[in-house]
Image (spheres, rainbow, N blue to C red):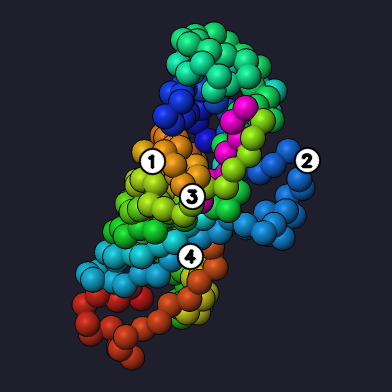
Amino acid sequence: YTRPDVSFESNNYKFTLENVGLSDNEEGKSMGKYFSDSSPQFSAKIGYFIANKWAITLSYDRYNTFFKDQQEVGLKGTFAPGSNSLYSGSVNETILLDRNQYNLTQKQGIDYISIGIQRNDMLGRTKKSEFALSTLYGIKGGILLSNPESTYDSSTSQGSTSVSGFGLTMNVGIQMDFYQYIYLQLGLNGGLLSQAKLKLATTGNYTAKQVVGYLSPTISLGFNIFANPKNNCGTCPQW
């Protein structure tokens, strides 16, 4: 993830944590936690060829974000008297971020639901099509659903699930087809997750916002379903 400015707002305060470092995994957790955690990160996608080499896609991606602890960030904003144990009035300084003081966690996942378009170009195949290699690239966009958890002045609260913003993504990769039906994809996704309104509580006016850039390497396993036994529809991959 890039280092976003994360803004918090309520009736009693309005401040921004500047240049915040984010992680997609909590410190101290092994790689195995990506698969066994209560909120695993994964992607699923279906597509349909509408023309030779071109397909429309419908995707679901889940991402997690965590503040990195004990990092230097900028703190800029205003606090109403009595609303914070450390600050009152206007503040503009650099602090060492303590997640027990300020935190925004999306460990229940950012659910990214998107529609896109993708192009597949076959580079080559074996004589009987036991194996084929293709390049692919595309673009997609959609909505973000979030249910964040936040900490303010040592008090942690659970937010509510809502549409928090939108995402835009570009992807590139290679696809290896086996016997025309099974394939393995190695890819790289990159884009923007713009969350303009994260609801930090089930009641009251407590919100946050951030815009995050990201890169995500992917490994995908899938299969092809052919609409016709012969490629006479003009939209199937050219074998």
- Tell me if mark 3 has few (under 14), some (14-19) or many (20+) residues whose alpha carbon lies within 10 angstroms of its own: few
- Tell me if mark 1 has few (under 14), some (14-19) or many (20+) residues whose alpha carbon lies within 10 angstroms of its own: some
Image x and y of residue 149, in percent: 58, 44
Image x and y of residue 15, in percent: 46, 22
Q: Earlier in the sequence, mark 1 or mark 4?
A: 4
State left or right for residue 18 relative to residue 113: right
Front disc: 2 or 4: 2
The amino acid type found where label 4 is placed reads Ala
Q: Is residue 25 magenta?
A: no
- Tell me if mark 4 has few (under 14), some (14-19) or many (20+) residues whose alpha carbon lies within 10 angstroms of its own: few
The amino acid type found where label 3 is placed reads Thr
Residue sitting nearer the eye, 93 or 129:
93
What's the CA distance linking mark 2 and mark 1? 30 Å
Rendered residue at 62%/27% (across/down): 153
What's the CA distance linking mark 3 and mark 1? 13 Å
Q: What residue is shown with label 1?
A: 197
Q: Could you tell me if residue 163 is visible in this image?
A: yes
The quarter holding residue 227 reads bottom left
Q: What residue is shown with label 4?
A: 44
Q: Earlier in the sequence, mark 4 or mark 3?
A: 4
Residue sitting nearer the eye, 83 or 37:
83
The amino acid type found where label 2 is placed reads Gly
Q: Earlier in the sequence, mark 3 or mark 1?
A: 1
